[in-house]
Amino acid sequence: MTLIEHLQELRKRLFLAVLFLSLGTAVGFIWYGSAPAGWAPLGEILRQPYCDLPPEMRASFNADNECRLLATRPFEMFMLRLKVGALAGVVISSPLWLYQVWAFIVPGLHKNERRWTYAFVSVAVLLFTAGALLAYFVMSIGLRFLLGIGDEFQAAALSGGDYYNYFLALLVIFGISFEVPLVIVMLNVLGIVEYATVKGKRRLTVVIIMVFAAVLTPGGEPASMLIMSVCVWLLVELAFQFCRINDKRRNRSRPEWMDVDDESAAPVAPAQPVAPPAPAPAPRRVQPGYPPQPARPASPSPTPVAPQPVQSTRTQESSHPQRPGRPAPKANPFDDVL
């Protein structure tokens, strides 16, 4: 595909993803106040942890002592319903818009990369859902602790905005914290983190998890912080065991020289005695395979020819008789020189 085709494909996938998110938001907005038969409205599901508190711990402003949240601004109820509906729409339409993202990415992946992506995305969704469900059941414990401080002199009257902001923040933080073990597993699969590196750092890992939970827990109350820390620590330990098994499967053994101190030399094996040289074998007599050929007689040497003296041109000319009728040659002035 060319660059223009990639951009056109990206525009198409983004348009479909936004369309599915908009439809999911509309469904969540309607579901907030009304639901089909046999289903509870979304607003009632979300306020249930608050309504589980004892009646004396929350203020009531109606005659029948019904559990209701307050609205202190004119547009607070509309904006709150829109916010909750949008978040619900993201969750409801997640299979559709995640497929658009996957359809844009998958042509550039190899077969094994597609398999690992399927596995990691599936596990990530399950872990986030587990963390969000745990936060839903933990929230009533946290509210009971927070609203029970000083209940002898005051009653809690929470507004819808404050309550839902706290509730949604707790859901998101628990869901994201449950993804930490998946990150460790991913780094081990890529070969960045090994079990030999992390196996001796469990105490430091526990301290980091506790600090992480104390800082990110919205209410700062000990119950939610302790529950999240214990759950994340268990998941991280499972991730460490996966790293151990995966490294063993790959036969990743730590070399011995890496454990030697920088100031000490590596052990050297003792010298072995040198074996004496083996004697050379005696030469064998080679037997001819065929009878020897008779020697050919030597050819007679050629008779040497005595060299003939070379006569000068003048002598040769004088030795030839003069033909009759032919004039005698003229004397050459350079004959005496030659």
Image (cartoon, helix red, strand yellow):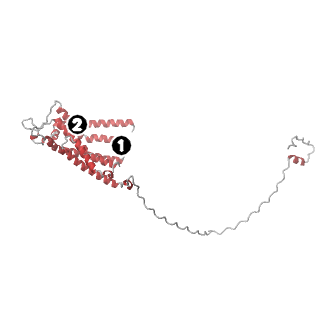
User: In the orientation shown, which residue stands out farthest toward the left?
Assistant: 63
Residue 86, given in percent of the width and then of the height, sits at: 22, 36
Q: Residues within 10 Å of mark 2 (few under 14, many from 20)?
A: many
Vertical placement of 70 versus 214: above or below?
above
Give the distance between the C-alpha atoms of the residues marked 2 and 1, in whole angstroms.
30 Å
Q: Amino acid at mark 2?
A: Ala
User: In the orientation shown, which residue stands out farthest toward the top?
Assistant: 74
Q: Residues within 10 Å of mark 1 (few under 14, many from 20)?
A: few
The mark found on residue 86 in the picture is 2
Upstream in sequence: badge 2 or badge 1: 2
Q: Is residue 261 left or right of residue 232?
A: right
Q: Nearer the viewer, residue 205 or 163?
A: 205
- Residue 98 visible from this viewpoint: yes
Residue 120, given in percent of the width and then of the height, sits at: 30, 47
Q: Nearer the viewer, residue 232 or 200?
A: 200
* Mark closer to the observer (2, 1): 2
Residue at 24 percent of width and 46 percent of height: 210
Residue at 36 percent of width and 46 percent of height: 110
Question: Which residue is disc 1 drawn over?
Answer: 107
Q: Is residue 187 left or right of residue 90?
A: right
The mark found on residue 274 in the picture is none
Where, quadrant-wise, is the C terminus in this rendering?
Answer: top right
Residue at 88 percent of width and 48 percent of height: 315
**Local secondary structure at mark 2:** helix
Residue 336, given in percent of the width and then of the height, sits at: 88, 43
Q: Quadrant of residue 68?
A: top left
Q: Amino acid at mark 1?
A: Pro
Where, quadrant-wise, is the N terminus in this rendering?
Answer: top left
